[in-house]
Amino acid sequence: MPILHKFQLDNDTQIGVWHITENMDELKWQLQWGIQDIEVFNSYKTPIRAMHWLCSRVLIRQMLYTND
C-alpha cells in the first residue's frame, strides 16, 4: 500500500491518499487488534463499510510510521 499523496495542512493535520489494491484479509494483518477494534469491525453490516474502516486504520498506521 504505497501512499500516493501526503498533504500537510498545518502543524496538526495531515491528509494521506492511496489506491487500495489489497483485499480485506491482507489489510487485517497490518493492524494490531484490540477487543474494541474487533467489536467495531464486526458491527458493520456491509463489507464495504468494514473495508472503509479497515483502510482508514491502516492508512493512519502508515502515516504515523507505526506499522513495524
Image (cartoon, grey):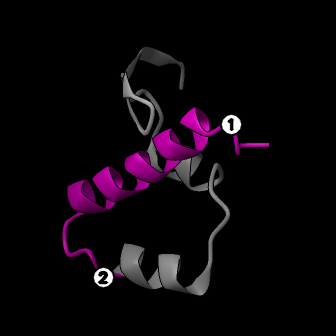
Quadrant housing residue 48: bottom left
- In-front residue for pair 43/8: 8
Main SS of the magenta part reads helix
- SS type, badge 2: helix
Where is residue 4? Give x, y as percent: 42, 13
Q: Which mark is residue 12?
A: none
The residue identified by callout 2 is 43
* Mark 1 or 2: the one toward you: 1
- In-front residue for pair 52/46: 52
Q: Residue at x 42, y 55 (%)?
A: 54
Residue most toward the top? Answer: 4
Residue most toward the front? Answer: 11
Q: Residue at x 26, y 74 (%)?
A: 44
Where is residue 23? Give x, y as percent: 45, 41
Residue 50 in the magenta stretch? The answer is yes
Considering the image in quadrants, where does the C terminus appear? Answer: top right
Quadrant housing residue 67: top right
Task: In the rendered view, tell whether residue 4 sits above or below residue 47.
Answer: above
Q: Residues within 10 Å of mark 1 (few under 14, many from 20)?
A: few
Where is residue 52? Give x, y as percent: 29, 51
Q: Amino acid at mark 2?
A: Ser
Give the magenta-colored segment's residue range.
Answer: 43-68
- SS type, badge 1: loop
Where is residue 5? Give x, y as percent: 39, 14
Q: Which mark is residue 65?
A: 1
Residue 60 in the magenta stretch? The answer is yes
Task: In the rendered view, tell whether residue 32 sits above or below residue 44.
Answer: above
Instruction: Give the CA distance from mark 1 to mark 2.
Output: 27 Å
Quadrant housing residue 40: bottom left
Q: Residue at x 44, y 85 (%)?
A: 39
